Image (spheres, coloured by chain):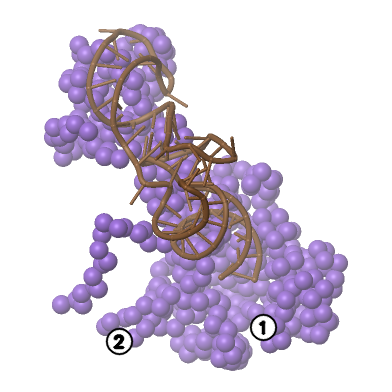
Amino acid sequence: MSPLPIDVPYRFPGTVPASSVGVGHELLEPGAGSGHVVCVAGRLMLTRPQGKVAFAELRDWSGSVQLFAVASSTDRFEELTRLSLGDWVGVTGEVVRTRRGELSVQVATWSLLAQARHGFGDKWRGVHDPDLRYRQREVDLWANDGVRETFLLRSRAVASVRRLLDERGFVEVETPVLHPIPGGALAKPFVTHYNALHADFYLRIATELHLKRLVIGGFERVYEIGRIFRNEGLSPRHNPEFTSVEIYQAYADYTDMMDLTEQLVAGVALATRGTTRLVYQDRELDLTPPWRRATMAELIEETTGRAVNLDVGRDELARVAGDLGVTVSPSEGSGKIMLEIYEKTTEPGLWGPVMVMDYPRDVSPLARDHRTKAGYVERFEPVVAGRELGNAFTELADPDEQRRRLEAQALERAAGDDEAMVVDEEFLRALEHGMPPTGGLGIGVDRLVMLLADAASIREVLLFPALRPEQREDREEPASPDEDG
RNA sequence: GGGCCGCUAGCUCAUCGGGUAGAGCGGGGGACUUUUAAUCCCAAGGUGCCGGGAUCGAGACCCGGGCGGCCCA
């Protein structure tokens, strides 16, 4: 490429959005000028030089507008026609309509704002290689239609979650990401080292325990939107770091959280898509409240025709699991077997939305015993399109019972379950100060956005999804990081 | 970890019953005073992911590895 003399200005003030240029000029006749001079800036995405005139599509965040340049009236015309696709320019000129009727900015003066040394893929087909799209999202955003709209939708979805919760009197907080012991969920953590404390710490696997401590501290309605880290595999539905919103409401139980779930999800759908009746992966999905509510046992029986519940006993559960092709290890108790049967046979086929209620107690160490059903807890998961969108309980507030549950977890951990919880004395001490009856709800923000954006893969809704580090042959291995001197 | 699919020019993709590689776009040069993925002309651009193997001959076939996608664990 012939290097152009670059004299990039420090600022290019006074621009208007490209998509707004035509506003007020709808009646401009083909071939006519408006007398109205505007500044626009963005990238050149198409160029059509024609000798002594030239056309280009200038695209900015808002959309695009055609640039029209004429050798006799455009500053440095020849230089302008030598620009490459992807170059950033700022132009000043009159709003006109060309003879063919295209509303345009007729360039009078212009500045090169940045050069694009690399292309943005095929100008018609963009880039398709998933690795390239995710690794170089800055390219994907320009090359492929719809990508920026997805992330704009995500931004609006998160904003509407905040607005809906704020309207209901919830207070947004931020709690630590680095935890001395992992807690609040059954998951493997990432480990890091805290130099100042000479101790290993864990990236949080949930925000649950700190938020409950805030309820104990008097935050009766509290929530946190934040990044969660789980040291597990990558898949089209899983990214090791993802975003959750966890919500706690004092004096409420899980039925209240079901109401809140419906209202929240439907509200976000309305705010971002204008409707609660969506299409997800070519299938209708109606998020309009109220959603169906059914127990796990009912749903398993609907799907399999078999009675799967804690009353039938472990041996019978294990037998049914075998019949259904679900493998069970000898160490698993009734609750775990029931959950596995549900997850293997029933959940993937639940299109929903449906509130799946009443989980076995021994797989739910933070939820309160069901008020009428022995062995179960008051817990539900909202399930949409065959996967859980969240998780919610009537929270366990009794410190003695919580200690027993955590000690049981610790035994399972000692027996080799590295997703089991550990006893968190700080949390237990907080519970001893008294937590009122409380409902808690967590929603996976990424999965919610997938539904709204009709995205099949979580990577489509994460700007920079987790990827293996890029192999660079032209670069040495990074030296070990220096200790802070 | 297992199965299936893929990896060819900067991008998107072809090619073939094994005979040493093509197009469009982009980038470079040129023509063009109203284009809309402008058009036309010219030239450049490839260790066919890497490494082995059978073959007179492999990008194609076989084996191993790498990376990616999907499915399963």
Q: Which mark is residue A79?
A: none
User: What is the x, y in percent for residue A202?
Assistant: 41, 78
- Give the position of the N terminus of chain A as an image quadrant: top left
Q: Colour of chain B?
A: brown
Q: Is residue B11 above or below residue B73?
A: above
Residue A183 visible in this rendered orientation of the protein: yes
Q: Secondary structure at mark 1?
A: helix
User: What is the x, y in percent for residue A118?
Assistant: 30, 40
Q: Colour of chain A?
A: purple
In the image, what residue type sits under mark 2?
His
User: What is the x, y in percent for residue A73?
Assistant: 20, 13
Q: Which residue is mark 1?
A: A362
Q: Nearer the viewer, residue A467 or A349?
A: A467
Name the side, left or right, on which A454 lies relative to A8.
right
Mark 1, residues whose alpha carbon is within 10 Å: few (<14), some, or many (≥20)? some
Same chain shared by disc 1 and disc 2: yes
Q: Which residue is mark 2?
A: A198
Mark 1 and mark 2 lie on one chain; the one further toward the N terminus is 2
Residue displayed at 53% across by 76% down: A187
